[in-house]
Image (cartoon, helix red, strand yellow):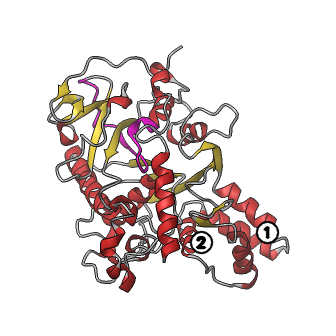
Amino acid sequence: MRRSYVSLAATILALGALPARAQSGGSEELLPPAPAAVVSDSQGVGWRRPDVPNGLLLPLHDLGAIDNDRLQLPGHRTALYALGKDAGDYHPEREPLVLVHGFRGEPVTFGPLLARLAASDRYQVYVVVFDDYRRRTTLNAEDFAEQLRQLRSSLGRPTDLTIVAHSMGGLLARRTLNELTVGPGGGIDSFGNIRFFAVDTPWHGYKGVSDRGLLGFVFKGPRWLVVPRGFEDLIASSKMFQGDPHAKNPAERAGLYDVTLPPNVTTEITFAKESKIVLDYNEKYWLIGDLEPLDEKLVALYAQGTPVTGSRAVENFWKALQQSDAFGSLDADLHALASNGTLDLASVHAALEKHYPEFAGTHRQVFAEHPEGPSLLDHLEEKLTPASTRGVAGALRRE
């Protein structure tokens, strides 16, 4: 028990030691100075417009001026805002592209990606601001789902939706999609195709004392001395991951991976090459867990039919992969390897790398430019913009 608290505390301290609220940097080098913007007395920089979500259009050219904490709704509730170059630059007729930052992050994380997409007129960009430290992910997800419902209602028509999420933002987005699918407010069927890109998300969860069962009840008070509310749902054995059988909301009763998303939702999972904050199939770290046994467990599954069991981290991670868009191809490849007698640790690992790629950079810097490759920005640019209209930097990149 003591070791679980120490491990979780050390993990939180490690996360907190990283540059808070400035994950990528560099966006100011890619974008020219922002046009003059009005300053809201309570929310910061932006332009007041009655037809945009929450009445404020935020500056696309000055992502660093967007204050995540000040822009939250009363009660630290999650909010959705549109981005534009100036007060007239709002295009509700375009497909929404929603960006979700990670733990202690800010929208500036996505500056290099937006520079890559600047030449495309396919999207209206939105950002999610939420209290990732003092408020639980499940509550933020309920808010996020309601914000998406309101956006869909304001648009007045069915629309496709694209979500790009980083780190903890991927868990928030997935829990939000669950809420839209089985939660009391519904809403998933009011959208067309929903594409969800999750980058270096901790699908495994972290070590720590669960909020479930007797231990969860006993340590409900002392937990707050060590675990911030925003981190409690990230524990691998938490109610968010494993489900809460006593909850009234069906999205809460189900575990994070026990809600089957409808066919109009696709999920892509990718990782950063150099990350000890978030693990993938290549990694283990004593503060977090060990996913290296996954290769061996998949050999046993596809060769002998032995179910994948083990630590909460391994089981959570495997469930996440199974619900991704790439799983069908991975499953077919592993069955083929088993059939022709070439299934082993090396071939399983190669298949995981093929279908769930790693991109250059650390967890915090994976959205930066990486000429050495493989580049996440190259990958997302190819996925998000048609080849005929794709721009490498567009009008927003400096010469």
290 lies left or right of 195: right
Q: Secondary structure at mark 2?
A: helix
Horizontal arrangement in the rendering, residue 182 relative to residue 2 (left or right): left
**Residue 363: image tag:** none
Q: Nearer the viewer, residue 391 or 317?
A: 317
- Residue at 53% x, 72% y is 3
The x, y position of residue 272, in whole percent, is 61, 48
| Mark whose residue sits in front, 2 or 1 | 2
**Residue 13 falls inside the magenta stretch:** no
Quarter of the image for residue 142 reads bottom left
Closest to the observer, 304 or 5: 5
**131 lies left or right of 355:** left
Tell me the residue at 24%/29% (across/down).
46
Q: Which mark is residue 314?
A: 2
Task: Please state the extent of the stretch shown in magenta in the rendering.
Answer: 87-109
Amino acid marked by disc 2: Val
Q: Is 98 in the magenta?
A: yes
| Residue 308 drawn at (x, y percent) | 63, 79
How many marks on residues? Answer: 2
Cβ atoms at labels 2 and 1 below 8 Å apart? no
Q: Which residue is pictured at 42% across the width and 42% down the height?
A: 20
Q: Which residue is mark 1?
A: 345
Main secondary structure along the magenta-highlighted residues: loop
